[in-house]
Image (cartoon, grey):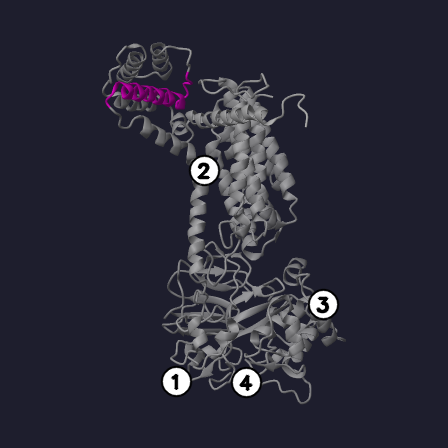
Amino acid sequence: MSGRARLAICAWVATLLASCAMLPLVSPATWIIQAAFMLAIQTGVGAATRRVPLARPLTVAAQALVTLLMLTLVFAHTQALAGFVPGPEAFQHFADLLQQGSDDVSRYAIPAPLHDGIRLMLIGGVLVIGLAVDTLAVTFRSAAPAGLPLLALYSVAAGLSESSVSWLWFLLAAAGYLMLLLAEGRDRLAQWGRVFGGAQRTTPGSDSSGPLAPVRTGRRIGAVAMAIALLPLPTISGGLLDAAGTGVGAGNGSGGTISAVNPLVSLRDSLNVDENRQVLSVRTNTNDISDMYLRIVSLDDFDGTTWKPSQRHIQSVPNTFPTPTGLGADIKRSEIKTRISAADWYAQDWLPMPYPPSGVSIDGSWRYEPVGMTVVGDHGQNTRGVTYQVTSLDVQPTAEQLATAPEPSATLRNQYTKVPKSLPAVVADTARKVTEGSTSHYEQAVKLQDYFAVNGGFQYDTQVDVGTGRDAIAKFLKDKQGFCVHFSFAMAAMARTLGIPARVAVGFAPGTPEANGSVSVGLKDAHAWPELYFEGVGWTRFEPTPNRGSVPSYTQSTTPGSDVPDPALPSTSTSTAPSAAPSASESCTAQLRKLDGCTSQAPALATGDDPRGPWSYVQLVALGLGALLLLTIPFSPMLWRTRMRSVRLGAHGRTEADAAVHTLAVWEELTDTAWDFGISPDESLTPRRAAARIVELGHLDPPSAASVHRVADAVEQVLYAPRPQLAAGLAQDVRRVAVGFQDTSGRSTRLRALVAPRSTIRVVWALSAWWTSVTTRAAALRPTLRKPSGQRG
C-alpha cells in the first residue's frame, strides 16, 4: 500500500472517530453507518483522482461533486434529475430540510429524534469535515492543520452533549488525530530515509535499522502523552469536557444554548425569610388575577433526585411567538396584555412572564428558548430595574376537553414520561393506588392534585427536613410534610409513572392587588407547580400545594367538604407561607449571612442571581486554559519553528568556538527554511553544492542567491580553516533567503511552510535518538545483573 493511500485511510478513520462524539445527540445512532459509507466513497474518489494524477484543486472539486451527488441521491432523489443530479428543486428541498433540522434542534431535548433534517445536518457536516481533513492531510500533505476541523467537529458535539462518558469521545478523537500525524511522519520517513546522522536506530541483538524506528518511538510517545492528558479527566467537575455546569444562567453567555442547571439549591433555608419585599409590579388588563402566574422556567429533566431544565438551543426573540405546542383551535382563549416592572435589586437571568406568552417587548440583550417558551438574558443581561410588556393567552379548556384529549405523539410521550430506574417503587405504587378507577389521564391528574391538596393529609411546612437524594420523594410521601417544591416534584414524577407527560414550572404565584390598580408580587409569592400535557390543549397548570396559589377552574373537585382554596382569592402578603427567595433585610438570619443569602437578591428559584460561587470562576479559567491547549496543539509545529529560528539566529559569542557554533546553526536554519518550502536537505553534498541546489530548485533572485552562497562560504571556512573567523551578517542573509522563498512560492506553499513546516520532523528524530540511547544503556546494564553462565547457588 502506498503512503498516500495509507494516509487517506487514516484521514477517514480520524474523521469517523471524531464524529462518534455526536452519537449521544440523536436516537437512534444508525446515521453513523450511512455517514461512514459515504465518507469512504468520498475518500476513494480522492485516492483515485490523486492516482491519475489530477491537479490538487481538481481533486478537491471531484470529491466535492461526488459528495453533492451522494447527498442528492440520499435526501433529494425525488426532486433531482435522474435521481442524483441536483437541480433548483433539489437545492430548495435541501434548504427546507436544513430549516426543518434547525427547528428540530431547537425543539427537542437531547437525544433528539433522527428526522430527515437532523440526519442531513449530521451526515452533511461529517462529509464536509471529512473533505477538509482529506484535503489538508492527503491532498496537500499537511496533517497538522487537519486537526482544526477535527477539533471543530468534536467541540460542537461535546458542547451539546450531556453524556457522562464525554472523555471517551475525546479519547477517540485524539487517537484519530494522533494516528493521522504518525501516518504522515511515517510516509515522510519512508521517502527520505535517514537524512541526518545521529544515534543508531538499532537495539542490541538486532540488525534492523531504517526509518521506521522514529515512527515506533512516536507511537510510544503519543500513547504516553495521551494517557497523561486523559488521566485527570474523570476528576474534573464543570471543566472542559462537562456537558453542563451548575448554578443559574443562560449557559456560557454566547447566546447559543441554555445549560442544564439546577435552580433549586438550598431552597428550604432561602424560603424562611421575614420580610416580603416587592419583586415585581404588575399591571394587566384582565379582571381576574387568580391565574396570573408569572412563569420563569420549566424543569423537564428528571434524574430521580431533582428536576432541572434540559440543555436547549436559544435564538433571537421573535416579534410574535408561535402557537404553544399542542394548543388546538377549538380551545377557548383570550389575549392579555401585561406590563411588568422589576425592582432595581432583582437580578434574574430569566424573564418572568404569564404563560403561554405570544410576544414580549423589552430593551436589552435577550434570547428566546422555543421549547419552554421562555426568554433568557444574553451576555450578562438580567431583569434588574427593567420594565417590559408581555402579550399572553388566557387558555380556558373545559374538563370535558381535557378528559377526551387524545394520546400525545410518541416523541413527546417518550421525552416527558421518562423516569429513572432509581426512582423508588413506592412512587409509582402510590400513583396507581391514588388514581385507581380513573378512566382518563385527566381524571388521574385531578385525583393526584386532590390527593396532595385536599384529602391526602399533607401539610405545607418549610421547616421540615424531607431528605435528599433518590429517596427524597419517598420520604415526602411518607412524612406528608413539605413545601411547593416537594409537592410539584412529587406530582410530576407520579404523573410520569402513569404515562402523563409532565414537567415542573418555577416562578411566582399571583400577587396582591394594590390600591393604584397594580399587583405587587413579593418574595413570598415565589412558587413551583407541575405542568401536565394534554393533546389539543398543551401544557396545563395544576396546583397540588395546599393553601398556595389558586386551583385552576378546570380541576375543581366536587368532593363535599373540600377545603380547596377559592380560586378567586390570590395569595396575600400576610400569608405565613415563606417565599422561595432570600431577603436583604436587616432581619436576615445568621445562617443566611453565612450562605451569603442576604446580598443575593434571590435563589435560583425566584430571583436568578448567580449562586455559583467562586469555584465557577476557577472552572471558567480551567475551561479557557483547556481550550487554549487544544487550539495550541495544531499550531505546535509553527511555534516550534519560530522558537528554533529565534535561537539559531540569535546572539552569539566572539571566540573561535562561538564562530563555528553560530555559523553551523545559521546553516542548519537555512537548510530547514529551504526544507519548509519543499527542498529536502541532502547531506551527501558539500556546502557549496548544497547552496547551488537550493538556489536552483528555489528559483531564488540574485540577492537571495548571493546570501545563500555567503552562508555556504562561511560554513566551509569554519569547517576547513585552521583558525575559523566569525562572518558578519549571516542571520540577515538567512532572513533575506526566507523572503526570497516567499516571493517565488505559491500561496499554499507559503501557508504550508508557516503552519506545518516539514523540518519539524527533527523533533521526532531527536526523541527517537534519545529513546534509542536510553534503551541501549538499559540493555548494556542488564548482563551485569545476571549470574554468570553455569554458576551454582
From the viewer's side, name the closer residue of 298 and 694.
694
- Could you tell me if the residues under marks 2 and 1 are in contact, i.e. CB atoms within 8 Å? no
The quarter of the displayed image where residue 462 is located: bottom right
- Nearer-N-terminus badge (1/4): 1
Circle number at residue 633: 2
- Nearer-N-terminus badge (2/4): 4
Distance CA(mark 1)–CA(mark 4):
20 Å
Circle number at residue 516: 1
Distance CA(mark 2)–CA(mark 1):
64 Å
Residue under the point 51% across and 47% down: 156
Residue under the point 52% across and 41% down: 228
Residue 637 located within the stretch drawn in magenta: no
Residue under the point 54% across and 62% down: 309
Is residue 87 visible in the rendered image? The answer is no
According to the picture, the residue beneath numbered tag 3 turns out to be: 425
Residue 655 located within the stretch drawn in magenta: yes
- Position of the C terminus by quadrant: top right
Distance CA(mark 2)–CA(mark 4):
65 Å
- Badge 2 marks a residue whose secondary structure is helix
- Point out the stretch of residues depicted in magenta: 654-681
Amino acid type, residue under disc 1 in the picture: Asn
Q: With respect to residue 122, does 582 lie above or below?
A: below
From the viewer's side, name the closer residue of 518 and 133.
133
Residue under the point 52% across and 60% down: 370
Residue 679 position in % (x across, y down): 41, 18
Amino acid type, residue under disc 4 in the picture: Ala
- Position of the N terminus by quadrant: top right
Amino acid type, residue under disc 2 in the picture: Ile
- Badge 4 marks a residue whose secondary structure is loop
